[in-house]
């Protein structure tokens, strides 16, 4: 084994031991995503258990009777299982316009001939439109409709009636909204942990003033930073199992998919994030600044890349660029895996994030080494002095 590999191994083991001896770091990488999940659950719980989801109710039946009125009555009934529906009668044109504009997420249409078909035990349909994939995933709007339809046919239809739920473009399984958030926060936890841990391993060298000693000992700075990066990647996986278990205990839902695919997608993401952390640590040189940088950077991509918030909130330009960012690709594949257990563009997304991960793994130690040789405080002081001197010259 050559000197560089020995240095990487020694630094890797050293940083793992440091993490074990400093439980504050481990507590932070576990508790921050956990607190974020619990806080978000309490925040979104108000929406989840609130007054209900606005639902367009289009009644095309011209001769409503006991069946039509009964179905409307059941839709209006209070539902103890959230999310609840808040039906708003409107015409088809208005409902379609609001639905296309994204102002309303759910449309239920009672078609013409509905009353006559049920009165004579004939075939009919109730048309349900649910908004796009992200809205469907985060609000789980189809389940309350299924419950309402189930109550309706149990109360009004004959025992030998055949009821079939044909839901075009909807999934066989959609996790509860808050469980879905827990699954995606697990990815946030990996990103935050990798950035924070990698950054803090660099800042500790500045705080303890040991970087010069390591360099003078003849060890390769590149190998040292690479060992720090790899140790951060390993420790960053502490939070996800706890978040998955918590989601299961609260909502009874495990994510779909394969654990090996999860690791294959998140491992290069963790390397990518740790590379950013290495550079951030060399720039800020204080662990106090690394925590907000890691938390805000990870949460920004959790919101935008994960499709949690509309991209219009961050601008059309970012929305366009975001489609091609490696982190967003990983989020999209993981979201589809969590919900469907399928992987439509797995190899493309895995290839993209792997390329960026390798680039950061190569570049970040070099950039960090260059930054450590720079005295930012002195440079800023010199700039201020030159500016003041320029002002005093008549």
Image (spheres, grey):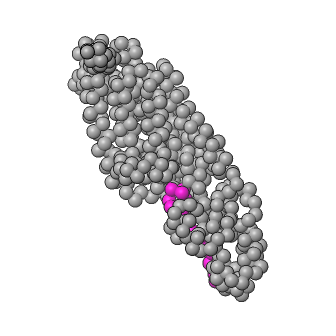
Q: From which residue to which does the magenta span run?
A: 123-137
76 displayed left or right of 200? right
Residue 181 against residue 133 in the figure, above or below: above
Residue 31 vertical placement versus 155 (above, below): above
Residue at 39% across, 27% down: 199
Q: Is residue 235 above or below residue 162?
A: above
Identify the residue shown where x is 75% and y is 63%. 77
Percent across and percent down for residue 220 are 24, 22
Of 155 and 76, nearer the camera is: 76
- Quadrant position of residue 371: top left
The residue sitting at 41% across, 21% down in the picture is 286
User: Vertical placement of 325 versus 226: above or below?
Assistant: below
Query: Where residue 76 sits in the image (x, y, percent)?
Result: 73, 65
In which quadrant will I find the N terminus? top left
Point out the residue furthest to the front here. Answer: 394
51 relative to 310 in the view: left or right: right
The structure residue drawn at horizontal position 58% and vertical position 48%, both measured from the top left corner, is 179
Asked if the magenta segment contains residue 69, the reply would be no
Q: Position of residue 38 (x, y in %)?
A: 61, 39
Asked if residue 94 shows in the view, the reply is yes
């Amino acid at each position: 084994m050559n000197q560089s590999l020995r240095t990487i191994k020694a630094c890797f083991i050293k940083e793992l031991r440091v993490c074990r001896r400093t439980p504050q770091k481990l507590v932070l990488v576990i508790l921050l995503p956990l607190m974020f999940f619990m806080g978000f659950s309490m925040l979104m719980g108000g929406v989840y258990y609130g007054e209900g989801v606005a639902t367009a109710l289009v009644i095309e039946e011209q001769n409503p009777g006991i069946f039509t009125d009964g179905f409307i009555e059941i839709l209006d009934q209070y539902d103890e299982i959230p999310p609840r529906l808040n039906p708003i009668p409107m015409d088809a044109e208005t409902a379609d316009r609001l639905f296309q504009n994204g102002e309303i997420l759910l449309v239920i249409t009672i078609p013409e001939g509905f009353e006559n078909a049920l009165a004579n035990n004939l075939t009919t349909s109730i048309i349900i439109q649910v908004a796009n994939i992200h809205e469907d995933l985060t609000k789980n709007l189809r389940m309350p409709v299924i419950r309402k339809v189930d109550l309706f046919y149990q109360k009004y239809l004959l025992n030998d009636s055949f009821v079939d739920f044909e839901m075009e473009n909807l999934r066989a399984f959609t996790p509860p909204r808050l469980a879905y958030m827990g699954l995606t926060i697990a990815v946030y936890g990996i990103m935050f942990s990798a950035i924070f841990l990698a950054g803090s391993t660099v800042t500790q060298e500045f705080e303890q003033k040991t970087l010069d000693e390591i360099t003078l000992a003849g060890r390769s700075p590149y190998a040292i930073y690479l060992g720090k990066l790899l140790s951060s990647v390993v420790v960053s996986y502490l939070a996800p199992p706890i978040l998955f278990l918590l989601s299961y205990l609260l909502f009874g839902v495990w994510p779909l998919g394969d654990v090996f695919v999860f690791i294959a997608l998140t491992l290069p993401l963790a390397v990518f994030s740790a590379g950013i952390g290495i550079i951030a640590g060399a720039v800020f040189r204080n662990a106090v600044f690394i925590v907000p940088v890691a938390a805000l950077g990870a949460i920004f991509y959790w919101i935008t890349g994960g499709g949690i918030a509309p991209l219009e909130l961050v601008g059309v330009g970012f929305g366009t660029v975001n489609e091609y960012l490696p982190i967003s690709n990983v989020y999209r594949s993981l979201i589809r895996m969590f919900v469907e257990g399928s992987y439509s563009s797995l190899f493309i997304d895995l290839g993209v994030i792997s390329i960026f991960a390798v680039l950061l793994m190569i570049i970040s130690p070099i950039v960090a080494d260059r930054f450590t040789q720079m005295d930012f405080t002195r440079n800023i002081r010199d700039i201020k002095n030159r500016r003041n001197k320029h002002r005093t010259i008549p």
